[in-house]
Image: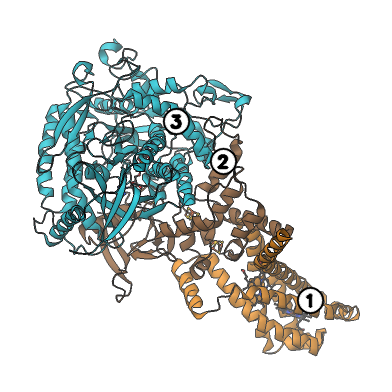
Chain colours: A brown, B cyan, C orange
Amino acid sequence: MGRQLTLHILRYNPDKPEVKPYLQPFKLEEEERMTLFVALNKIREEQDPTLQFDFVCRAAICGSCGMLINGKPTLACKTLTKDLPNEITLMPLPVFQMLGDLSVDTGTWFRELNIKTEAWIKTEKKFDPTALEDRMSNDEALAIYEADRCIECGCCIGGCATANINPDFLGAAGINRVARFMVDPRDERSEAEYFEIVGTGEGVFGCVGLMACDDNCPMEIPLQEQLAYVRRKMALAGIKM
Amino acid sequence: MSSYDVFTTDVLIVGAGLAGERAAIEAAEHGHSVIILSLVPPRRSHSTAAQGGMQASLANSAKGAGDNPDVHFADTVKGSDWGCDQDVARLFAETAPIAVRQMAHWGVPWNRVTAGKKVLPDGTEIYDDPDKEGLITARNFGGTAKWRTCYVSDGTGHCLQYAMDSVVVKLGITVHDRVEAISLIHDDTRCSGAVVRCLRTGKLRVYLAKSTVIATGGYGRLYGASTNAIINEGSGMFIALNTGIVPLGNMEAVQFHPTGIVPTWILVTEGARGDGGYLLDKNLHRFMPDYEPAKKELASRDVVSRRMTQHIRKGFGVDSPYGAHLWLDIRHLGERHINTNLREIANICRNFAGIDPVHELIPVRPTQHYSMGGVRTDINGMAYGLEGLFAVGEAACWDLHGFNRLGGNSLAETIVAGMIVGKQVAIYTKDASINVSTTLIQEHVREQEERIHNLLNCTNGKENVYEIRREMENTLMENVGIFRTGEALEKAVNKLDELYHRSLHVGLRSNGQGPNPELASALRINGMVKLAYLIAAGALARQESRGSHYREDFPQRDDVNWLKRTLAYWPKGSDKPVLKYEDVKITELPPGDRGYGEGSKQTAGTSEVSK
Amino acid sequence: MELQRSTELQKTYVTSSKLELVADIIQLVSGVSLAFFLWTHMVFVGSILLGVSAFNKLAAFMEEYYLLPAAVVFIIIAFTAHVGAVLRRIPGRWRDQKIIWQHAKTIKHGDTWSWLFQVVSGAAILILATIHVFVVVYGGISADLSSDRMHSPFLWFYLALLFLGEYHASIGLYRAAIKWGWIKRQTAKRVLGFATIIFLAIGLVTIGTLWMLGGSL
Ligand SMILES: Cc1cc2nc3c(=O)[nH]c(=O)nc-3n(C[C@H](O)[C@H](O)[C@H](O)COP(=O)(O)OP(=O)(O)OC[C@H]3O[C@@H](n4cnc5c(N)ncnc54)[C@H](O)[C@@H]3O)c2cc1C
Ligand code: HEM
Ligand code: HEM
Ligand code: SF4
Ligand code: F3S
Ligand code: FES
């Protein structure tokens, strides 16, 4: 016999705004190696087929399932119930638009972020299908990958109080995304151009160093270092300008 | 008649994985208006889960020297067990290097060649040429003569998808996420778009287009144990099948990956073996060299999966509550290598199995992984049967993979086919027009509204969608797995026949209002059971063994009778599929020995040979 | 001509967008110098531990060389700059206040709480330290005066100021260090935790000594 778990899940239906969000308890018997992915699907299939939540890869790769698990913003699919107490509270990530219950619209938020930060390689070069690729050192490639690993799960955004009060704040994911292009030799943007994107109150100078991002990133991207890197670089750029 | 939103575009792409987005970019660059539909935000598509890499014969790495499209072509044809179309394989192998370089241009941080001497885990020394320093490197993958798989540590699919989507964002291509195409609008000759359900509101919409592209990925989730994302339910394939006119090709060709982690079935990439990982049995004996002395752990996937199952059957498996399994050992690769090059794997082991692969063995068993079958198209990506309908990526049977896909060839396919098919879509769309009557649209919408109405009100019955689904999964797992027999397949077909009929009587438990997830599942279940039926029926009919399709009662490949492709139809009004066949296209390489596997003369696998 | 105008325009645009950077640097410089001021000041006041005469000599020395008014001027400038720069950070609107406290309660995250206490302690210091500076400047500084002030209900005032000031300075330095990436978070925590303990100890012993002096004199 496994433990008896009680999951208190935030219920909310945007179609019925008159019903305020509330926590609904569900009881469930724990199984060996049970993850919240398994637990939530069991609840949906056996207890309440209307329960909304998002999973895609169930392997901590796609970034769909960020939520507050006993307050901590993290991925539900990689959270084992054995690491949690008997009482578990699940809430949707703050900041993002609520779509229902545990489901939030991270997709739209991140698309807007990518438009705002012009998160693509900016270059005047045209692709030549007959030429060899441009060379790059393997260390450079690894440095880009380190930042490129972000899965847009939104845990760093949902956990950041600054992002919660300022909807325009790029957040750690946004600043890290810009850092990814800064270290990329293929991107031809000048420091001044980068300054306009992140040298602002919505960018790196809006970050007050709460470090919830650094503590909660499920990909363990070194966000503190990335934020500091961009802050120093932008300060220098700003002073030179 | 209720109201619904109508969207009109030149090109409608259903699916925002690598294949869909690449095709969308091509069409948009040719000046067409494009809308991409997706169940999830594009960057959550299953393509991001691919870790290992993408094949292209760049020949930059030491062990890739001498590689070229000819070698890649031959590997692909052998891998497919001569089931592919060779003109497609040729086009593919020639284009793959361009695709990899273009992705580099778009920002993919491919790992690069570092010059100098290196010692491989097995002791061999290799020397990377200083001339190649900084060019895109490659790793070893199963079934290839050269090291050809380009990679980004172990986040290849992720980086490819992010770079691809960054171009989609840059070009301002419209993406509607959290929507699901539930049927194609057509008049039996032309496809004019799709009826789509919005997963935010539950409302129906109509999308009208000059050309429609299905890029919805695989159907892994028909199986209970699959490495696939849970959205891989084959919906694109069955909406094509539901037209009654479009056939699906080779649905019985299902790939099992040798190393799914027990019991979550999350994939441990082939890179783990490519980088030198071993498979061990319960006595911690490395058994693969006994079966496959040449390629060992790196024979093609179908072969390794079967060898593993065979070895488990001989009693060498490790017992566990989740059934017998084997071990994957990467400890000897060292902490540094594991925590950098195989970091994602290390994390998966730690998070989902509580195992530290630096010090511990990983429990693995072959797991459903890839669908070679799909919407049958010609070399231009045009679906058989309906004009204006295209398919690309894992959802398609273009037919590059035949009966077995090589690792690294499907990421390459999504992008290469995306380029080629996208261009053909652009050409087709230039001369096409949207020509569809309001009555036809309303007819299609009404049909879907009626289905929803019936499910909500339990008009046809109260069958539980989750129960049917579980029974379907179990049927495929038990009877249509790695080793197949006529008897088991017959059982499966009978069971699926029953499930098909029951799926017509599903009724909801909940009220089904708004973006109700139970309704979404209920709308899919009938189509999913149909796909499962095609797999079982196709496998039962095919009385030979080829690639991943292995019949114990017909263990030999039979080129005389079966050198052909299954085309499965589900005619309107029928309660059974109809199977037809067509010849595979052989342009260069006549059927021969693969060089590995049970049928090969070069391996000592079967007991007769080992004598 | 045309070109020059447009670059000029761009310059004003760019300069105005540099405001946040400027504010951030003012905040950093003022914060860090206030922290060092506080610590130096703790050591100075701690001279009472070496005896009454040492304390008095130091006070006289400071008077003589105009170091006291210099310190007062510095404090006024640094405070104004710091408060000015930091004000933009303090959630002003009621709605924001509600969100931020709710947020901290929900996510139960140490560094988020410490920031909120930083804001609160900063606001408290603003009042307490202003009073304190007035009192010492107008009341004068000597072992007698100081210990008398201490041996009174003012004791509680000093204890509060000590703890709030130390907390605010240490957390402030920690935050500045990690935001600019000078040291690793764990190292920063350890170093500053150590410094805090040392200065709290000095402060407490000083307060205790002054208090006892105040009783005995
Ligand atoms: C774990 C794993 C690892 C892999 N590793 C490798 C590897 O290393 N190398 C390699 O070459 N291959 C690998 N593969 C295979 C490869 O990743 C896939 O075959 C490939 O990514 C499929 O891409 P796709 O674009 O066809 O489909 P997907 O990426 O699956 O995209 C499908 C898209 O269609 C959308 N969609 C689906 N149905 C609908 C609908 N009804 N309406 C609207 N939208 C819909 C989805 O939202 C999604 O955007 C791996 C596969 C798995 C499972
Ligand atoms: C002895 C006096 C003070 C010292 C030593 C001090 C020190 C510091 C330091 C070092 C920082 C970090 C700066 C940075 O992160 O860039 C800081 C931040 C801060 N200070 Fe002070 N400060 C003092 C007085 C005050 C006062 C009077 C207030 C009142 C309003 C205040 C409010 C704040 C706030 C809100 C922050 C946080 C700003 C942010 O994180 O962005 N401080 N302080
Ligand atoms: C020009 C400015 C300042 C002067 C001249 C000054 C001087 C003094 C003096 C003389 C004392 C001894 C007690 C007394 O005489 O009342 C004292 C104590 C103290 N002061 Fe200040 N001070 C100044 C600013 C500050 C500021 C800005 C703080 C801020 C936080 C502060 C915090 C304290 C504390 C906590 C004590 C208690 C003694 C201790 O713990 O060491 N002072 N100060
Ligand atoms: S930076 Fe980390 S926490 Fe933030 S979105 Fe990316 S992966 Fe998630
Ligand atoms: S939590 Fe927020 S304030 Fe900065 S350090 Fe992280 S982005
Ligand atoms: S479901 Fe993909 S990250 Fe959790």
Asked if residue A20 shows in the view, the reply is: yes
Instruction: Work out whether B504 lies above or below A208.
Output: above
Q: Quadrant of the N terminus of chain B?
A: bottom left
Q: Residues within 10 Å of mark 2 (few under 14, many from 20)?
A: some
Q: Is mark 2 within 8 Å of ligand 4?
A: no
Please tell me which residue is depicted at 33% across the width and 45% down the height of the picture. Answer: B229
Instruction: Work out whether B589 lies above or below C111.
Output: above
| SS at badge 1 | helix
The residue singled out by tag 2 in the image is A142
Indicate left or right for B342 with B503 as reference.
right
The quarter holding residue B71 reads: top left
Which amino acid type is marked by label 1?
A: Phe
Indicate left or right for C43 with C169 as reference.
right
Q: Is mark 1 within 8 Å of ligand 3?
A: yes
* Numbered badge on residue B96: 3
Single out the residue that lies furthest toward the right: C64
In front: label 3 or label 2: 3
Q: Chain of mark 3?
A: B
In front: label 1 or label 3: 3
Q: Is mark 3 within 8 Å of ligand 1?
A: no
Q: Residues within 10 Å of mark 1 (few under 14, many from 20)?
A: some
x and y percentages locating residue B182 in the rendered image: 24, 51
Please tell me which residue is depicted at 48% across the width and 41% down the height of the picture. Answer: B343
Which amino acid type is marked by label 3?
A: Ala
Q: Are marks 3 and 2 on the same chain?
A: no
Instruction: Work out whether C114 lies above or below B460.
Output: below
Q: Residues within 10 Å of mark 3 (few under 14, many from 20)?
A: many
Cα gap from disc 3 to disc 2, whole angstroms: 23 Å
Indicate left or right for B294 with A162 as reference.
left
* Numbered badge on residue C74: 1
Q: Chain of mark 1?
A: C
